[in-house]
Image (spheres, rainbow, N blue to C red):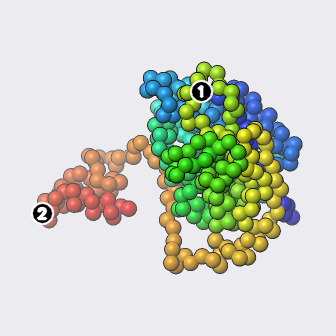
Amino acid sequence: MPSESFTLAAAQVEPVYHDKARTLDKTCRYIEQAGRDGADIVVFPETYFPGYPYWRGSVSIPRWTDLMVDLQKNSLHVDDEAIDILGETVAEADLTLVLGTNEISDRQGSETLYNSLFYFDSTGELVGRHRKLMPTHEERAIWGRGDPSCLATYETAVGRLGGLICYENHMTLSKAALTAMGEEIHAAVWPGFWEQHGHPGDKTRAETSDAVDTCDIYPAMREYAFETQSFVAACSAYMSDAVPDGFSAEELGFNVAAGGSMLINPAGIVKAGPLVGEEGLLTAEFRDDERRATKAYFDAMGHYTRWDAVSLSISDKTLTPSQPRESGTEAVAGDGSLSAAQAQAVADEYDVPIGVVEAVADELAD
């Protein structure tokens, strides 16, 4: 019979900033430690590999460009040798890994970065990835937008696993989508923990766990657990006071990496954390009955839903830069179902603007 209990871990680990090789070595050591601690799933923070760009908004455009190139060189690619090394370490530790990383696009000709989660199963295989759908504020100058298809869940030995990145955990419909996909365990990754001073645009790095009074992460993670009846591993980034090599303190003006990781049961009860102001591997054991007991009162995929009143449409599209053209046609309207010549002929016959014909064709194609 499947186990009725399991262990979650949040690796609140400081990367070797902008250093791919040394960050890889440190990552493997913490995966091994999580395995020794009996973790079934271990989660690393948002863009842990090789560090969140806390320099965004704090440097000149020329310096920003140099740092972007450096970040590209030290980020992960799905065909990277580092993926094989991580996979071997995961298999040896016999656990599931959710790794926050800067990801280099695998589209031929592209060097775009994405804010991604990489999912490794317990055999060490990279089974999927999630790219942040909408980078926040200045992040849009760093990362591209993820495809709709990357909103997904994955089966593990201890339950169905999904994940979201930073403010995605506030997005009502994305949460609902993962719930509809049967998510039971949720990996939530963040760039740190902070105090808010009136609104999200005015925040400072948390100094103590008292920041729970104003940090949106704390209530959001407890609510995520309760409203979806899922076990939540919220893993937040940590960096020490030491300024990384090649940087000045002023350049890291957005450094909110105070940690703040938490492990939460489906009733919204924090069983470990928040761990603030230090590096550490946070672990907690959970029982499946904790989820069942919450669902007995409030089942978001069962007796407490009204799909006849509210329903959700989920896209699984992958965005591509080009579409195949039908043989023998010129420029096409919509998805290629109507050629330009055909559209013009219909417009002439019925004496309507060609734009109206193309709009109707697009609507019918959808």
Is 193 in front, or is 325? 193
The answer to whether residue 351 shows anywhere in this view is yes
Residue placed under numbered mark 2 in the picture: 351
Q: Quadrant of residue 294?
A: bottom right
Q: Position of residue 322 (x, y in %)?
A: 40, 43
Residue placed under numbered mark 1 in the picture: 249
Above-or-below relation of 247 to 80: above
For this orientation, the residue located farthest to the top is 246
- Between the C-alphas of marks 1 and 2, the distance is 67 Å
Q: Quadrant of residue 34?
A: top right
Q: Position of residue 154 (x, y in %)?
A: 67, 55
Q: Is residue 359 left or right of residue 273?
A: left
- As shown in the figure, which amino acid type bears the numbered disc 2? Asp
Q: Is residue 172 left or right of residue 226?
A: left
Which residue is rendered at x = 25% and y = 57% of the image?
358
Q: Position of residue 342 (x, y in %)?
A: 22, 56
Q: Return the disc, 1 or 2, that comes first in the chain's sequence.
A: 1
Which quadrant holds the N terminus? bottom right
- As shown in the figure, which amino acid type bears the numbered disc 1? Ala
Is 229 in front, or is 311? 229
Q: Position of residue 205 (x, y in %)?
A: 62, 41
